[in-house]
Image (cartoon, rainbow, N blue to C red):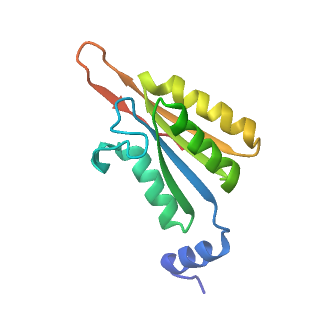
Amino acid sequence: MARAPEMNNRVRKKAVKPLTVFCVYSLEDYVSVERPLASFSQIFFGISFIASVCKQAVHDVRLFVAVPNPESIQHLLDAIKKDRPRVLALTAVTSQYPLIGRIAARAKAIDSDITGHIGWALCNAQSGSGHQATVL
């Protein structure tokens, strides 16, 4: 007898070993290194969706805001050394891609087994508008 789809989902969730997932959002203009966001509404939906889906699938999810400051970057790299996440999901607008790219390279140097996924946005410099794409 076939199980109902919702029962199959519950069984699958129990069988999957939870992963540690780090989601990293970059921000150029920040309030302070300790509290970079004025409001959580500044975080684009893409990385929020990924974090929510991973959390709903019972994974251990942590969200980091990376800013162009050595202290901020070191905090994230120290957390990677300590917690050894299996997945590193990063997102950036075009101007922040170099920062996110450096973080991804340094994370891979710390742990070559980490799976990294980067999403970025292409911005229209004339209008100031852009589209943020986050890929996992």
Q: Nearer the viewer, residue 49 or 27?
A: 27
Indicate the quadrant containing the C terminus: top left, top right, bottom left or bottom right.
Answer: top right
Would you place residue 101 above or below residue 31 in this image?
above
Q: Nearer the viewer, residue 8 or 118?
A: 118
Residue at image position (71%, 37%) is: 108
As drawn, is 91 to the left or to the right of 123?
Answer: right
Would you place residue 105 above or below residue 76 in this image?
above
Would you place residue 123 above or below residue 12 in this image?
above
As drawn, is 126 to the left or to the right of 82?
Answer: left
Q: Residue furthest top?
A: 126
Q: Residue furthest bottom?
A: 1
Q: Position of residue 102 (x, y in %)?
A: 60, 28
Q: Residue furthest right?
A: 112
Q: How many marks?
A: 0
Indicate the quadrant containing the N terminus: top left, top right, bottom left or bottom right.
Answer: bottom right
As drawn, is 86 to the left or to the right of 70?
Answer: right
Q: Nearer the viewer, residue 107 or 6?
A: 107
Q: Position of residue 69 (x, y in %)?
A: 49, 31
Residue at image position (39%, 29%) is: 28
Residue at image position (35%, 42%) is: 44
Q: Position of residue 109 (x, y in %)?
A: 74, 35
Q: Position of residue 13 (x, y in %)?
A: 59, 72
Residue at image position (57%, 76%) is: 8
